[in-house]
């Protein structure tokens, strides 16, 4: 099969890059009327205000929809669509973590195509244009700012629906450290490791290719070297920018390769509980890597090299084991919970989790096949 790499989002990066927001919006619409899609935390932290100031300065009209919740639900997406209709808005500006960007994308889908969001689950189910989307990530781990996928939780089936369609790829993403530098350390740490997970899973995907390899290896290096300082210090603009760019690079890559078993499991748990996605991935990553190790030892060794581990004279398998340890060290340094029980998860959801994870599209990209029992064992090890 031929390798495919789609490019779409224009990424504008740098401190105070959001000052270009007005000009970008005006380039997309002669009469813009903007829906800011965000959550109350972003509004209360004063981050949304930095965006609205830009729109005010440029005489651009807007309305703020701040009802986004973690692990976006169908109900929120429908409320957002109604809000958009009520105010007759024509451009979506997502400000926040992955939940805000994914919610904006899902609103764009049902606004354009009509009907219920379930209709669009899967690939390329939307057959008309959608409103333009601009993304301003305020955490590291999303990647959603640079790809054409959105995840919506279906509370009836307790699953995360994946919707992939090119019309919802953001036209522009602003990677501005001013929007992230004050992140609470725990959120900065968990989302940085989520971004690292994106890069490692994309690098070891069954359909990894040279373009995504280049993006992922540099992303792994940028995130590993800079995450501790970016997460722990609220004035380190340089490290924050590097982790943020690494996260976006991984997002560009996994939009083309898919992810792997870590995300298959964390999506399954995220449909059952409301534990933050980044924390789940950070807990699961080293355990899933140990499971995958026999199938991808050469690639894990390469991951360890760009994380700064000296692999001189060491076999692939030994090197891959050292990479797993390096990931653990990084998570400890970032003071991330290391056990599922630390975040209130118990073994009674493991069987259901394993069944759902095997149906997640990301599992299909994992290089080692897993059984239900294998996944239950990974979860028990991580408990
Ligand atoms: Fe993720």
Image: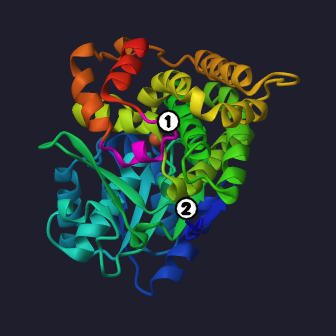
Instruction: Judge whether residue 366 is colored magenta.
Output: yes
Q: 41 or 186, which lies in front? A: 186
Say whether residue 163 is visible: yes
Q: Is residue 353 above or below residue 73?
A: above
For label 1, count other residues whose C-alpha is less than 10 Å away and answer few (under 14), some (14-19) or many (20+). some
Q: Identify the residue at horizontal 62%, vertical 63% (top origin).
A: 11
User: Quick one: 14 or 368, which is closer to the camera?
Assistant: 368
Q: Which mark is residue 185?
A: none
SS of the residue under disc 2 = strand
Q: Could you classify mark 2 by the number of other residues whose Cα lies within 10 Å: few (under 14), some (14-19), or many (20 or more)?
A: many
Which dot, 2 or 1, sits closer to the camera?
1
Separation of marks 2 and 1 at Cα, in angstroms: 34 Å
Residue 128: which quarter of the image? bottom left
Query: Where does the image place residue 15, in percent across and percent down from the top left?
Result: 68, 52
Quarter of the figure that contains the C terminus = top left
Its colouring scheme is rainbow
220 lies left or right of 24: right
Q: Residue at x 44, y 63 (%)?
A: 148
Tell me, yes or no, whether the two marked residues, 2 and 1, touch with CB atoms within 8 Å. no
**Callout 1: helix, strand or loop?**
loop
Determine if residue 235 is in view: no
Which residue carries the number 1 mark? 368
Magenta span contains residue 238: no
Residue 225 drawn at (x, y percent): 74, 32
What is the span of residues highlighted in magenta in the rendered image? 359-369
Q: Where residue 196 appears, x then y in whole percent?
A: 59, 37
Query: Mark 2 = which residue?
Result: 173
């Amino acid at each position: 099969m031929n390798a495919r790499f789609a490019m779409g989002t224009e990424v504008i990066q740098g401190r105070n890059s959001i000052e270009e927001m007005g000009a970008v919006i005006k380039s997309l619409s002669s009469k813009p009327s903007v829906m800011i899609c965000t959550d109350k935390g972003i509004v209360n932290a004063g981050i949304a205000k930095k965006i609205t100031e830009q729109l005010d300065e440029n005489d651009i009209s807007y309305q703020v929809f701040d009802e986004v919740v973690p692990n976006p639900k169908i109900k929120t997406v429908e409320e957002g669509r109604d809000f958009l209709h009520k105010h007759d808005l024509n451009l979506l500006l997502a400000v926040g973590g992955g939940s805000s960007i994914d919610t904006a994308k899902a609103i764009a889908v049902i606004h354009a195509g009509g009907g219920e969001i379930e209709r669009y689950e899967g690939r390329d189910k939307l057959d008309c244009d959608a409103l333009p989307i601009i993304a301003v990530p305020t955490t590291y781990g999303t990647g959603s700012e640079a790809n054409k996928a959105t995840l919506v939780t279906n509370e009836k089936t307790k699953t995360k629906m994946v919707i992939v369609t090119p019309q919802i790829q953001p036209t522009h993403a602003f990677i501005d450290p001013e929007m992230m530098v004050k992140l609470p350390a725990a959120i900065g740490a968990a989302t940085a490791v989520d971004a690292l997970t994106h890069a490692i899973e994309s690098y070891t995907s069954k359909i990894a290719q040279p373009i995504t390899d280049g993006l992922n290896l540099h992303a792994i290096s940028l995130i590993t070297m800079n995450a501790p300082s970016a997460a722990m210090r609220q004035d380190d603009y340089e490290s924050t920018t590097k982790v943020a760019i690494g996260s976006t690079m991984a997002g560009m890559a996994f939009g083309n390769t898919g992810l792997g078993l870590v995300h298959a499991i964390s999506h399954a748990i995220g449909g059952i509980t409301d534990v933050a996605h980044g924390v789940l991935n950070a807990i699961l990553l080293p355990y899933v890597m140990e499971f995958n190790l026999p199938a991808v030892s050469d690639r894990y060794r390469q991951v360890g090299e760009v994380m700064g581990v000296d692999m001189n004279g060491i076999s692939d398998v030994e090197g891959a084991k050292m990479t797993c340890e390096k990931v653990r060290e990084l998570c400890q340094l970032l003071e991330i919970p290391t056990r599922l029980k630390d975040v209130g998860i118990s073994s009674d959801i493991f069987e259901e989790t394993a069944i759902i994870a095997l149906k997640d599209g990301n599992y299909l990209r994992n290089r080692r096949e897993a059984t239900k029992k294998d996944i239950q064992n990974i979860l028990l090890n991580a408990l």
